[in-house]
């Protein structure tokens, strides 16, 4: 089963890297960019066919390792 975890900084947390990307895009002529928030993506393949069990296990992975839940939020998508 394939899954994708998207981790981003919480909206209340400043994102200096996102700001730097925003500035770089504007300097390259992309004036329509109003803001940028950067994050990270994990693509996982997990054994089994129980979607609910896989999602629960992946959420535990996020809580323990993949995301710093103090400052980051995460989203889990299961492809099947």
Image (cartoon, rainbow, N blue to C red):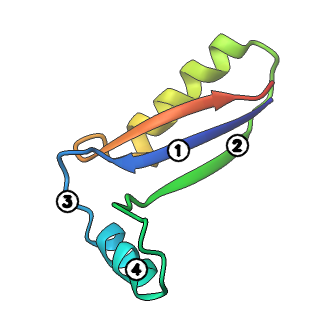
- The answer to whether the residues at label 3 and label 2 have Cβ atoms under 8 Å apart is no
Mark sitting on residue 22: none
Q: Position of residue 31 (x, y in %)?
A: 41, 74
**What is the C-alpha distance between the residues marked 1 and 3?**
18 Å
Q: Nearer the viewer, residue 20 or 32?
A: 32
Circle 4 crowding by C-alpha within 10 Å: few under 14, some 14–19, many from 20: some
- Residue picked out by circle 1: 6
Closer to the observer: label 3 or label 2?
3
- The answer to whether the residues at label 4 and label 2 have Cβ atoms under 8 Å apart is no
Secondary structure of the residue carrying tag 2 is strand
Secondary structure of the residue carrying tag 1 is strand
**What is the C-alpha distance between the residues marked 3 and 4?**
19 Å
Measured along the vertical axis of the image, is residue 60 above or below residue 14? above
Residue at 38% over, 62% down? 36
Mark sitting on residue 26: 4
Quarter of image, res 53: top right
Closer to the observer: label 4 or label 2?
4
**What is the C-alpha distance between the residues marked 3 and 2?**
28 Å
User: Which tag, 1 or 4, sits closer to the chain's start?
Assistant: 1
Secondary structure of the residue carrying tag 3 is loop
Closer to the observer: label 1 or label 3?
3
């Amino acid at each position: 089963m394939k899954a994708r975890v998207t981790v981003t900084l919480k909206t209340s947390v400043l994102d200096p890297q996102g700001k730097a990307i925003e500035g770089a895009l504007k300097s390259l002529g992309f004036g329509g960019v109003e803001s940028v928030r950067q994050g990270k993506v994990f693509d996982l393949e997990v054994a089994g066919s129980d979607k609910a069990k896989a999602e629960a296990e992946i959420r535990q992975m996020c809580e323990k390792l993949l995301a710093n839940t103090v400052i980051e939020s995460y989203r889990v998508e299961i492809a099947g």
